[in-house]
Amino acid sequence: MKPPSLSIPDAQLDLRGTPCPINFVRTKLRLEKMQPGGLLEVWLDLGEPIEQVPDSLTMAGYQVEQIIDCTSYFSLLVRRPFTEQ
């Protein structure tokens, strides 16, 4: 299995400009449509979105694999679990 830094996302979701908690809801809905084990890249704004969304996803049972600071936004790699919680 490839390390997370080399993982290629199966889908991408640009949520820059989307307020909390709508960005979390949209991320969760997109993950639920993906195949188990699927990797989603989410773009989030600085501040509340990057502070809240990763923790909320982890609490909902998703695996946050990587957070990359892209200066004006953050790229979040999150994986849908193979088995549902």
Image (cartoon, grey):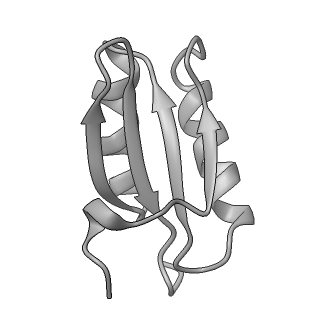
Extreme residue toward the right, this view: 33
User: Residue 17: percent from the left, percent from the top?
Assistant: 58, 11
Foreground of the two, 12 or 46: 12
Quadrant the N terminus occupies: bottom left
The residue at the point 69 percent across, 50 percent down is 29
Height in image: 17 above or below 40? above
The residue at the point 30 percent across, 43 percent down is 55
User: Residue 9: percent from the left, percent from the top?
Assistant: 52, 59
Foreground of the two, 53 or 34: 34
Give the left or right position of residue 50, taking residue 15 as reference.
left
User: Residue 65: percent from the left, percent from the top?
Assistant: 30, 59
User: Residue 41: percent from the left, percent from the top?
Assistant: 50, 48
Height in image: 33 above or below 67? below
**What is the count of numbered marks?**
0
Extreme residue toward the front, this view: 6
User: In the rendered image, which quarter is residue 31 located in?
Assistant: bottom right
The residue at the point 36 percent across, 11 percent down is 72
Give the left or right position of residue 83, taking residue 76 as reference.
right
